[in-house]
Amino acid sequence: MSTTAGGDGKPTTHTIPPPKTSGAATGGQQLSASANQFVDKIDPFSKRGNSRRRRRLVGSSRYHTDNEPDLVQLPLIKDASQAEQTNLAIQKLQQCQKIFDFYDPVSQLKSKEIKRAALNELIDYTTATKNAVCEPLYPEIIRMVSRNIFRVLPPSDNSEFDPEEDEPTLEVSWPHLQLVYELFLRFLESPDFQATLGKKYIDQRFVLQLLELFDSEDPRERDFLKTILHRIYGKFLGLRAFIRKQINYIIINGFALPLKQEHKIFLVKVLLPLHKPRCLSLYHAQLAYCVVQFIEKDSTLTPQVFDALLKFWPKTCSSKE
């Protein structure tokens, strides 16, 4: 939510809606329930209480903005011949690599609008046009997405940021960034998408950079990141083990039975000791869910779980009790 001054001088609170993941820009597609279940489990900041809100800032990542000429309006893709549509789409993707300074609301307004319109057009093109996602587009889309989303996130203004009590810093460049995420999601979900072609560009390094963005305080960005990571996990079998390792096997409900020994070791050596820290209340709900998933999959683990809970039972920390 954001705060503005009302007519009587008192602050008025307005609610900022969540990011749209359906509608015209997404081709009318809705995210699946399973995707939502998946993504909620890997976001440490999701579904927190809002008992106390200290601040809501609008910030931006440290982009290196370009000092290049303004963008030039290109013809609409739909008005081009079928033979020229791919080339025109590539030109628009290259245009969309240009980064703008959103701290200055009046700078390069024309170019900002050209990029916004191009992103919307590319979303519609990849969603509604048969065979639009062809091999020449793969490197251009990944290059454009990487150029826009991979950046150094600014340090938090509050070193003691608590997602349960503090308002996050919102990304000021979201008008463009949201559309970039939308386009990437539609690209991955296209029936024409081929993982055999995509794996040349979506590799371990790409996934690592994607995971680093989960440090963003903006919940809208993390929502997109979770859904995109889910799509990558589902389509790139060769990256599954790597992704599981990087997020510490948090996708527990997807483990096959019988449980592997490495998963049991993870429960005993990693998950159960997480009951030790004094800050347990920050992640207790997610931790409890993970432990229960293990027990439901293998009831023989119950004695080990209870032994660990008794071992780590709080004696002096009231917040953990």
Image (cartoon, rainbow, N blue to C red):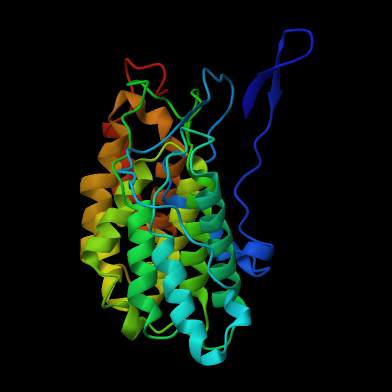
Q: Residue at x 58, y 63 (%)?
A: 120
Residue placed most toward the observer, 189 or 43: 189
Residue placed most toward the observer, 194 or 25: 25
Up the image or down, 142 lies above or below 307; here it is below
The residue positioned farthest toward the right in the image shown: 7
Q: Residue at x 48, y 73 (%)?
A: 187
> x and y percent of residue 213 in the render?
35, 47
> x and y percent of residue 234 in the render?
41, 73
Q: Residue at x 27, y 76 (%)?
A: 238
Relative to 57, is 318 on the left or the right?
A: left
Up the image or down, 183 lies above or below 310; here it is below
Q: Which residue is drawn at 64% across and 69% down?
A: 29
> x and y percent of residue 258 in the render?
33, 72
Quarter location, residue 94? bottom left
Up the image or down, 91 lies above or below 110; here it is below
Residue placed most toward the observer, 320 or 126: 126
Quarter location, residue 61? top left
> x and y percent of residue 230 in the render?
44, 64
Q: Can residue 158 be seen in this view?
A: yes
Q: Can residue 257 be seen in this view?
A: no
Up the image or down, 47 lies above or below 267; here it is above
Quadrant location, the N terminus: top right
Relative to 261, is 140 on the left or the right?
A: right
